[in-house]
Image (cartoon, coloured by chain):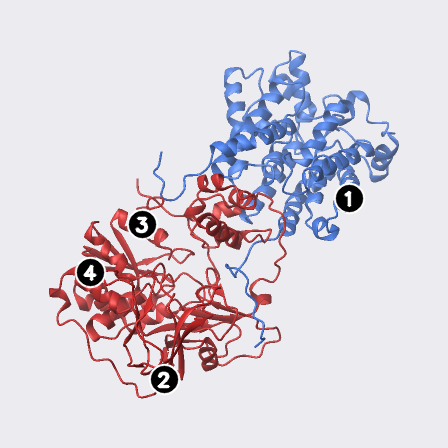
Chain colours: A red, B blue
Amino acid sequence: MAHTIKPGLPLPSHKQHSRDVAINALPAPDVLVLPLNQHRDAELLPCVAVGDAVLKGQAIAQPPSVDALGAWLHSPVSGSVIAIESRDTAVSSAADLSIVIRNDRRDARQAATAFVDWQQSAPLAVCQSIARGGIAGLGGAVFPTATKLAVHAHQNIEYLLLNGVECEPYITCDDRLMRERAVDIVRGAQILLHAAQAQHCVVAIEADKPEALAAMQAALSAANDSRLAVRSIATAYPSGDEGQLITQLLGREIPRGGLPADIGVIVQNVATAYACARWIEHSEPLISRIVTVTGAGIAHPANLEVMLGTAIHDVLHACARTEQPIAIDTIIMGGAMMGRALASEQLPIVKATNCLIVTSQAMLKPQAVEMPCIRCAECAYACPVFLLPQQLLIHARNDNRVALQELGLADCIECGCCDYVCPSNITLAARFRAAKQRMQG
Amino acid sequence: MAEQLKTPNAPHLHRAPSVRYVMSMVLLALLPAVALHVYFFGPGVIVQFVLAASSGLLTEALALKLRNKPIGMFIGDCSALVTAALLAMSMPPLAPWWLIVSAMIFAMLLGKHVYGGLGFNPFNPAMLGYAVLLVSFARPMTRWLPAVGIDTPTLSQTLRAIFTGEWPASLTVDVLSGASPLAAVKTGLSLRHTIDEIFAQPIFDSFLGGNFFGDIAGEGWQWISLALLLGGIFMLVQRIIRWHIPVAMLLGVGITALFMNLIDPGRHAGLIFHLFSGATMLGAFFIATDPVTSPSSARGRLVYGAGIGALTYVIRDFGNYYDGLAFAVLLMNLAVPLIDKFTVPRIYGEPRD
């Protein structure tokens, strides 16, 4: 029997502020800061030293061993390395080793290192190239793309799903990308199909993006590739979650504790496919990304193409601040449901920065006094992975690890649906994140 | 931009009705039934509610003070008012004042705050208070008024009866015996009357004349039950409650009643009678749906509701009490940890059984 998913939450959309603003490139700043921990589960070591001159697109950090796939890191500008030191990052609350580059404004590029013909190359060679291009999941998870694709060596991959769902209520960067650069996304999909040795590719787009859907359909028919298809899915949160998307499109579930590859599926974001095409076909490594800048504190919401390492402050400045009667006291990196509230606007843009929401606590959560749980179970009705958040809460408070394990704490996708519907304003997702970390540590 | 940025945890959005809003909507949904209660039985239910609400809020304030909790924040959730309203709806309208006051004090102190207040009580406080009264003071707790054939008590008659125990002269023992449909059926059956003979009594007549619709569940109660059903549907549409418990409970009552009625229609009143008399509708939509004391999964709530329904019928038909809802709810409250243990939902990615 095919699996079905819950209808999801109908979140009020805030995309209207930025969805019709075309992608615009932000000029590179004078100084760029590139943290080494910006990929998930992948260590990087600097391959430049302080004082070195660097070219635009030159690798500045790479995985510790030659065999490791991972994702490399490149200099977004030409100039010189002025420091390699610990800096605060938006990735975690701890400081991390970062490479600081001064822009010489000469825009001198690294010589092209592209494939002559990727279609004639071995899939594993394409994966290795994707790692060298610095490609990582641009939906926000930043897992190295090459590592994900290379599972085809020992697992049969049937489907490549391209995630253009963008279910978070503020983000529009993928929407704009699909509307403006659909041809490169389709080329990227073909490269990914080859690299993963997958048979079919389905592009999933939420129904609230009809222009993106039309653009992708047009690009697909132009490509005339029978392996590729596009599907519109209902607008609901969190339908862009990997597991939810697979179940919705294919009626399969990722086994508990397993990976999508276990059921013959790989999921990649549309922006990741785009980045692959730019690297493999145009020799442009991943040195910039599109960032949606929005929220009540922003006068001109925008979708900016920003060099990695640009200070968030400069990005916000480009979109102009508004004067609000209430304090603009919060900057969220990522979506309003799963994003991280930043402690400073001096932090640099990283590969995970898909959105910056500048707003105020008073507007986001007007009444946030936590009351006792009344066991109403709205959280259980809302949970997309069928957990019992109210029971998990009790066991998380008591640090009852056996019960937490039995009730599936590890299966929590941290989507925040339980918090959203809680009449007692209980912070559930944050407690579950903390409990997960305790149990791992 | 403020130098000091706030760093709250995700998610940064929240949209849920507050506990106070939910409780207020429950009270609103009760209003049509309360109006009919006043129409058939006089303003007793309002007086009982005022008594219950004031003694309940005072007791709750005292309990919160003793527990060193912020009084305003917790009293403001309106949950004590819902408990008061449910008790008032369950009390005979002319019952002496100290009955409902002691029930509320019991419900608030021993039903709720000794466990740690709202959210931690294993038993439905209103039903706990009601059951204590029913067991301890069976006679005044069952002195219901008939819905037809009496002069509806005025406010002053009601107040005199509640505060001095002096009932209007017209309400004689004869008038009051078997005044409620459930009592009439139980008394009638014990006298070896058939269901048909019992339903020929005046309390089953309709104020619309003759037996039109009156046979369904007894005049007065069937209309109040219908109003409660409408209030329940209102809460379902407003997403104040979910369907699982009410539907399962009505099925639990309905299927058992239908089954017994099919076996011997002369000795067991039918499906419609049981659905529209006594506390069936009040229980299904307003009492059994108390979130705190029900199981935490949808499947568990189906089991819980069905259990309350079946037990209510069994107590009505075979027990010593006219109605069985309060005991059915308390018995199923006891079973909640067990139900929770056996109805943990399948987690995403687990194979289906």
Q: Do labels 4 and 2 share a chain?
A: yes
Q: Residue A195 carries which label?
A: 4
Q: Which residue is drawn at 55% across and 62% down?
A: B8
Mark-to-mark CA distance, 4 and 2: 34 Å
> Percent position (x, y) of residue A111?
21, 80
Q: Which residue is drawn at 45% across and 71% down?
A: A87
Q: Is mark 3 on a helix, strand or loop?
A: loop
Q: Can residue B214 be seen in this view?
A: no
> Percent position (x, y) of residue B115?
67, 38
Judge whether B245 appears above or below A107 on screen: above
Specify few, some or many for label 2: CA neighbours under 10 Å numbering under 14, 14-19, or 20 or more.
many
Task: Read off the residue under disc 2.
Answer: A103
First in residue order: circle 2 vs circle 3: 2
Q: Is residue B192 visible?
A: yes
Task: Read off the residue under disc 1.
Answer: B66
Check the image and name the residue furthest to the left: A120
Mark 4 is on which residue type?
Ala
Q: Do labels 1 and 2 share a chain?
A: no
Q: Is residue B317 left or right of residue A79?
A: right
Mark 3 is on which residue type?
Leu
The chain identifier of the residue carrying mark 2 reads A
Please say if the residues under marks 4 and 1 sit with CB atoms less than 8 Å apart.
no
First in residue order: circle 4 vs circle 2: 2
The chain identifier of the residue carrying mark 4 reads A
Please say if the residues under marks 1 and 3 sit with CB atoms less than 8 Å apart.
no
Task: Read off the residue under disc 3.
Answer: A259
Mark 4, mark 2: which one is toward the viewer?
2
Mark-to-mark CA distance, 1 and 3: 53 Å
Judge whether A75 appears above or below A352 on screen: below
The chain identifier of the residue carrying mark 1 reads B
Please say if the residues under marks 4 and 2 sit with CB atoms less than 8 Å apart.
no
